Amino acid sequence: MSSTTEQAPPTDPSAAVDPPPPGRSWQGVRALLARLHFYAGVFVAPFLLVAALTGLVYAFTPQLDQLVYGDQLRVERVGGEPRPLAEQIAAARTAHPEGTLASVITPPEPEDTTRVVLSVPELGDKQRTVFVDPYTAEVQGELTTWSGSTPLTTWLDDLHRNLHLGETGRLYSEVAASWLWVIAAGGLVLWLSRSRGQRASTVRGVVLPDRSARGVRRTRSRHAAAGVWLALGLFFLSATGLTWSQYAGERFGQFLDVVKGGAPKLDPRLPSAPPPAGGTGEHSEHAGHGGAGQSAAVDPSDFDTALAAARKADLDGTVTLTPPADASSAWVVAQSDNVWPVHYDKVAVDTTTGDVTSRTRWADYPVTAKLSKLGVQGHMGVLFGLVNQIVLALVAIGLILVTVWGYRMWWQRRPTREDRKAALGKPPVRGAWRRLPLPVLVVGVPLVAALGWALPVLGVTLLGFLLADVMAGLVVRRRKA
């Protein structure tokens, strides 16, 4: 839930800056949440609105891809047995001899094309993907892709993650993800802790808006009731978005390293090769955006050998075959089926013997690695297919409505008397922290500090809110004096 609270505006103009009456009680917690919910909603809601709008469009990228790139992605007619990968690769290389052969992705469905991925230096971190009909070995087109994503999906992905502003732009999405759960949780507490006279004692009064209410009360009931329905989805989007964010994602990776909860690493070295000096951790992915291996000289027939070995090892469905980076490394074949039930097994294959030299199984992933991986796929709308997309779209639309209703509340609560007109409603009163019970202060301060460390953007922005609030209070007091 977003930007305001149900607290009525104070009748005294000085009430917004004067401290509340003394006396510590649990009502002080509610008053502090009201002020935090208000200010976080006012200043963070624009970030949430942009994230919801861009995420709404991104959720339907599979359908948009088919609409825009259907000629490359789908075959004209499903035939019998697919041609050998060597033949399909030869056709792709004849049409596009530039660059080096980076990987091959087998068709996810019978009507899909094979993707031959080329590493071309002038494309930087992007690739040239050639789409081949697996039944005729005819090239149907090519696209400049980024880790398997089409140009349209890549553009929408960058828009949602960083507004096409690079690493600096990622702060916008991290601000949204960091505060989304705080705003939603605070709104839930405020709505559920109303007095019994405000219909909080019935389930209907919590989950449905009050149709008999008028004005700001009607807007507030819509805002809050919708927030109750959306809460679980908002918590999920916040948590999964933070796992691959710039700063909180780094903290999450450190946590996985400490608890040894990362995904198991495949050893790509051949048995005769010396052991690797070390490796790097891997804790999250976004649309499979990892680097692909390259080889300057690859025998296309080795792709068929690697595929046969992987199929024999029960790697069914769509797989990505990556050539070895050097003579001491094996081929890597990885399942890339993101739709539930997912398949993420990997094998390393020695194509000279056809043997599997190493393997990682999805079943062996730690719980933390599984939750992280599945959460990312669910966040992107691919885990449960169309159902996943529809749920994400409903949550995004709901977040947009809740944000708009929050701002409408703020406007409706403005003073309208001739002697006290104002453009917007006043915020909840200052000084609520003085009314907090001592146990809350003793536990809350270290907890907030720990959250600020784990979620650096949340910590920095919260500190900014506190400093701005203190400065505003000092200015008003100086004017009154």
Image: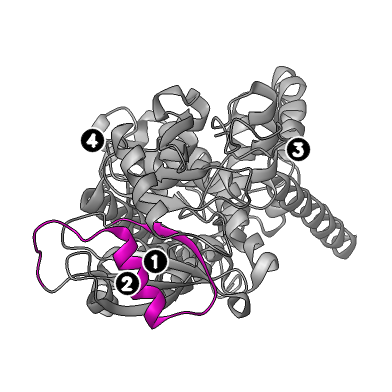
Label 3 and label 1: CA atoms lie apart by 43 Å
Q: Which residue is mark 1?
A: 116
The answer to which image quadrant residue 351 occupies is top left
Q: Which residue is mark 3?
A: 453
* Amino acid type, residue under disc 4 in the picture: Arg
31 or 138: nearer the viewer: 138
Q: Earlier in the sequence, mark 2 or mark 1?
A: 1
Q: Which residues are magenta?
A: 77-106
Q: Badge 2: how crowded within 10 Å, few (<14), some, or many (20+)?
A: many
| Percent of width and height locating residue 122 | 62, 80
Label 4 and label 2: CA atoms lie apart by 54 Å
| Percent of width and height locating residue 152 | 40, 75
Q: Nearer the viewer, mark 4 or mark 3?
A: 3
Label 4 and label 3: CA atoms lie apart by 39 Å
Q: Secondary structure at mark 1?
A: strand
* Amino acid type, residue under disc 1 in the picture: Val
| Percent of width and height locating residue 143 | 40, 77
Asked if residue 40 lies left or right of residue 334, the reply is: right
Q: Earlier in the sequence, mark 4 or mark 3?
A: 4
Q: Which residue is mark 4?
A: 204
